[in-house]
């Protein structure tokens, strides 16, 4: 059974950077789309970004476009999220998720495997 484990969260000042990683155990996830979602305090979980199988294409929420970059290393079975120019509104629990198909989706319901989440706190 595939499990996803996120790491790299923490506390950072506004304007700073963090890099999140998501390691998938078990069989390779390279043929599946991978996404990052986040849940700000008191709010619903929301789409951040996704990367298609084999890294062919990516998709970003408007709120993070130009600041966040998703990438994947199929050999290591990992997906990363580089977050730059962080803002206080980026504070959230960040989740890695895998979709059972190759193409990206912005919908939470289209992902069936989720990590436990990692906290990112941006202080102003």
Image (spheres, helix red, strand yellow):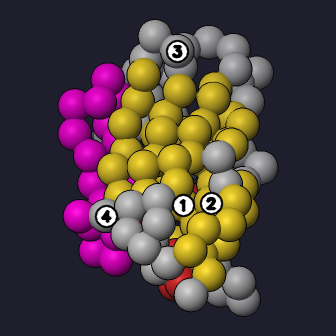
Q: CA distance from mark 4 to mark 1?
A: 15 Å
Query: Pointers 1 and 2 in contact (CB under 8 A)?
Result: yes
Quadrant of the rendered image containing residue 15: bottom left
Provide the secondary structure element on which disc 1 rests.
Answer: strand
Looking at the image, residue 95 sits to the left or right of residue 86; the answer is: right
Residue with the mark numbered 1:
37
Provide the secondary structure element on which disc 2 rests.
Answer: strand
The verdict on residue 64 being magenta is yes
The span shown in magenta is: 48-66
Residue with the mark numbered 4:
67
Q: Is residue 78 above or below residue 48?
A: above
Q: Is residue 89 above or below residue 115?
A: below
Q: Earlier in the sequence, mark 1 or mark 3?
A: 1
Q: Earlier in the sequence, mark 4 or mark 3?
A: 4
- Residue 100: tell me if it is visible: yes
Quick one: label 1, few (<14), some, or many (20+) residues within 10 Å?
Answer: many
Disc assigned to residue 56: none
Q: CA distance from mark 1 to mark 3?
A: 21 Å
In the picture, which quadrant includes the C terminus? bottom right
Q: Earlier in the sequence, mark 2 or mark 3?
A: 3
| x and y percentages locating residue 46 in the rendered image | 52, 72
- Nearest-to-viewer mark from 4 and 3: 4
**Residue that appears at 42% across and 49% down:** 82
Q: CA distance from mark 4 to mark 3?
A: 24 Å
């Amino acid at each position: 059974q595939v499990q996803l484990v996120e790491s790299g969260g923490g506390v950072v000042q506004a304007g700073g950077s963090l890099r999140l990683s998501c390691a998938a155990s078990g069989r390779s996830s390279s043929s599946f789309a991978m996404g990052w979602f986040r849940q700000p305090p008191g709010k619903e979980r929301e789409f951040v970004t996704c990367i298609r199988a084999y890294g062919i294409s990516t998709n970003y929420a408007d709120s993070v476009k130009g600041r966040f970059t998703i990438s994947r290393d199929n050999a290591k079975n990992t997906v990363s999220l580089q977050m730059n120019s962080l803002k206080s509104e980026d504070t959230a629990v960040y989740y890695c998720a895998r979709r059972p198909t190759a193409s990206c989706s912005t919908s939470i319901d289209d992902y069936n495997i989720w990590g436990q989440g990692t906290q990112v706190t941006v202080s102003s």
